[in-house]
Amino acid sequence: MSFFGFGQSAELELVLSDAESRRRVEHKTEEGKKEKYFLFYDGETVSGRVVLTLKNPNKRLEHQGIKVEFIGQIELYYDRGNHHEFVSLVKDLARPGEFTQSQTFDFEFTHVEKPYESYTGQNVKLRYFLRATVSRRLNDVVKEMDIVVHTLSTYPELNSSIKMEVGIEDCLHIEFEYNKSKYHLKDVIVGKIYFLLVRIKIKHMEIDIIKRETTGTGPNVYHENDTIAKYEIMDGAPVRGESIPIRLFLAGYELTPTMRDINKKFSVRYYLNLVLIDEEERRYFKQQEVVLWRKGDIVRKSMSHQAAIASQRFEGTSSHTEAKTPSQTAENNGRQ
């Protein structure tokens, strides 16, 4: 067996340098289960060590080189054979040779660009992972470790309300309004439905959150709609002039940020679907797209710091003068 290269076997382990302090988050796997992974953001350094453990201490391990890779890739489920890599970094850890005892190799990928958020959908998966490889003539020794990347956004400068009038001529005329068109993942959708004309016997009204996943291009485009939430806003017949309030909390649902044309492979969009059902079980609905974004503490702190600097410049105060932004004043009041 030694003649064919099977005399020595080895195990690989990937250990992050900040594994004890780094935050872990739940992320859905392809099988629909939730597992915890280490969380990273765009531009963060990924560092750690590769631990090579020999199973047979008295035998040597011949190899053609050892390397570690940081990979970001998109996999379309209908095209399993092709992995579309948008990030591919490699570090060589050892030249070809042999080992007679276990080894540890340090690695560091500095300020790694991670342009997209990790995503597991119904037809597509976007994943980031580390892969350590001991190259051998007949059978490589490979170990992979997935991580999760979240993409943070700042508060959008333009966030106008949504206001529309819809209806059926001489039968139904309603006006609906949502307070914003862009919401962060823990936000609250506030709105109202105003009935201008009601000549249909409506018995039920609900608002749905629909996720639309689009994969492929051209003639090979696949649309997959998934109803994330159903929220009843009215039970019973409305009358003309009645106003129905809406208050929908997003924090309780499994949502991702809106993703548009990610690496020209897929998109994820969200829609608010207003549904009215009459006594004859006919359904009337109107969809409106909304943009979802991820808000983080890192962004909030940096924004308040920038606001303080801008305030000092605007007021022309010196470094000895204390200039408080509205956010700082609120923080002080909160402490008191």
Image: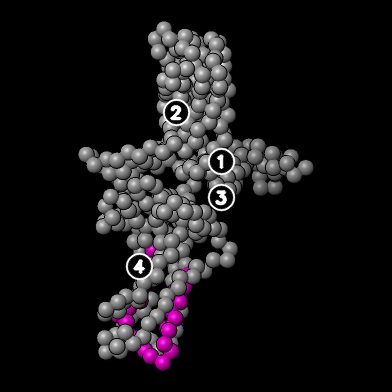
In-image side of 196 versus 120 (left or right): right
Magenta run includes residue 108:
no
* Residue that badge 3 annotates: 298
Q: How far apart are marks 2 and 1 (CA)?
A: 18 Å
* Residue that badge 2 annotates: 273
Q: In percent of the image, x 53 and y 44: which residue is there?
A: 295
Task: For the residues labelled 3 and 4, say whether their Cβ atoms are less than 8 Å apart.
Answer: no
Residue 210 makes an appearance in the image: yes
- The span shown in magenta is 48-70
Place of residue 130 in the rendered image (x, y in percent of width and height, measured from the top left): 41, 65
Q: In percent of the image, x 51 and y 22: which residue is there?
A: 204
Residue at the extreme left of the image, as rendered: 219
Q: What residue type is labelled 1?
A: Ala
Q: Name the quarter where the N terminus is drawn.
A: bottom left
Q: Quadrant of residue 248?
A: top right
Q: Which amino acid does label 4 sit on?
A: Val
Up/down of 92 relative to 110, above or below: below
Front one among 171 and 279 = 279
* Residue that badge 4 annotates: 90
In-image side of 214 versus 319 (left or right): left
The numbered mark, 3 or 2, whose residue comes first in the sequence reads: 2
Label 3 crowd (10 A; few <14 / some 14-19 / many >=20): few
Q: Which amino acid does label 3 sit on?
A: Ile
Task: For the residues labelled 1 and 4, say whether their Cβ atoms are less than 8 Å apart.
Answer: no
- The mark total stands at 4
Q: Name the quarter where the C terminus is drawn.
A: top right
* Residue that badge 1 annotates: 251
